[in-house]
Image: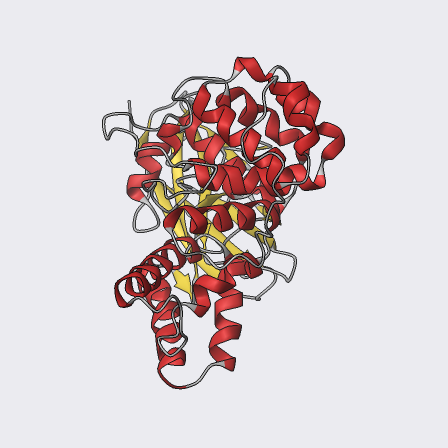
Amino acid sequence: MRPLLLAIWLGSIGITPALAQDAAPSKPAPVASAAPASSSARPTPADIRLAETVVFYYVRKDPTSLFPVFAALREPGGVNRTRLSRASLAGFLSMVFLQNRSRLEGWIGQGTNYPPDMKSVLVFALWQSGNGDLIYPLFHELPNFANDKPGNLYTLTPRSPIEMDLKWGAFFATGNPGFVAAMVDALDSGRPLTGSRELDAAIRSTSLAGLTLNMRQHEVLERYIRQRSLEASGAYKQVLNTLLASRQAAYKPAPDHDGDFAGVIATLKLPEKPDPEAMRAAGLDGASGPRTARRGDTIGVTVLFSGMQLADDLSADVSYDIKVTGPDGTVNPSSSQTDVAALKDKVPGRFTMLDSRSTLSIHFEPADKPGSYRIDVLLKDNISGRKVALSRSIELLDN
């Protein structure tokens, strides 16, 4: 058996943005929402990466990551499969444009290259961000609201799904939960909203749905709601606590866990590529990949995990120790590695299933004895101090 530690990043598994759905337009909103994409138009891996770029942009705020977004906007219907509404895109781009005036012409290019629905998003975002003077040079036309003064997305109190999506988009661009504070406030049944019982009920219901979905993926949002819960009282406090409990109930750690911190070992036969669908299906309740091998096979070993603690700046620090024990009970010294970096980076949330950014490659030689080769991993969350012991066996067949 010949082990080798490789610097292979398999990529994150199963991150699918949870977003508010599109809704019918309400005048005089400059941006209308599109109808939801057909259920038959399943998101491709590229679509998912595009949505992740938008929804988690605030984690790194890397302007160079946005070029694929503008390429996608040029493709008719290209954004629909991502489940991003046009209003959330408009809110997102409004905040990005506000912070990157010098990049706008390079990003947008020729305005005539965009389909009408995406052109309306870009035009609105330019106007909303205070860059309305660029609308005519780039698009050779002016909307009827071009001379109006844009409102403040931060202080906007949303009264419709479109306005809510505008604020969600602004949150994705900035990571500032203050953009969705009005939706958190709307959960307080004692707080007056519009005076209309029906509209108030709709606002509260839609706010709760959006917060529930997005809180599962954004640690900064959960921290904000937790803080608001500490400050609240009465029925409002109970609603916020129930919201927080729903996130906890939705997360099911793997059998091997220490508190929320959980992990599992997965294997794959190299040089095959990992199957994200299989890994996602297995999740942290099981492990994907082969459990048997033959001489000459090379088996890649990686570690899946979630529930790690995040620092104040959303940084994670996860590592592991690994060793492989042969059928005779001896540990191959080349397989014994300590403090292997699994993740040392910023991430948006604690509860997305992630994979180690390194893998151990095990090559079975002709002289290796048949039998069970046990892989032992000690997975370590270096921020919380939690540790999880993991084990998985590969049976080398006698061929």
Q: Which residue appears at 48% of the width and 68% of the height?
A: 225
Left/right of residue 202 with respect to residue 128 in the rendered view: left
Left/right of residue 243 with respect to residue 172 in the rendered view: left
Residue 115 x/y as whole percent:
46, 18
Residue 107 x/y as whole percent:
65, 24
Residue 118 x/y as whole percent:
48, 25
* Residue 25 sits above or below residue 390 on the image: above
Is residue 28 or residue 307 the one in the foreground?
A: 28
**Residue 252 appears anywhere in the view:** no
**Residue 27 appears anywhere in the view:** yes
Considering the image in quadrants, where does the C terminus appear?
top left
Is residue 332 or residue 120 the one in the foreground?
A: 120
Q: How is the image coloured?
A: secondary structure
Left/right of residue 77 with respect to residue 10 in the rendered view: left
Toward the left, the furthest residue is 40
Is residue 376 or residue 382 the one in the foreground?
A: 382
Residue 386 x/y as whole percent:
52, 65
Toward the bottom, the furthest residue is 234
* Residue 239 sits above or below residue 157 on the image: below
Q: Which residue appears at 64% of the width and 19% of the height?
A: 138
Q: Quadrant of residue 202?
A: bottom left
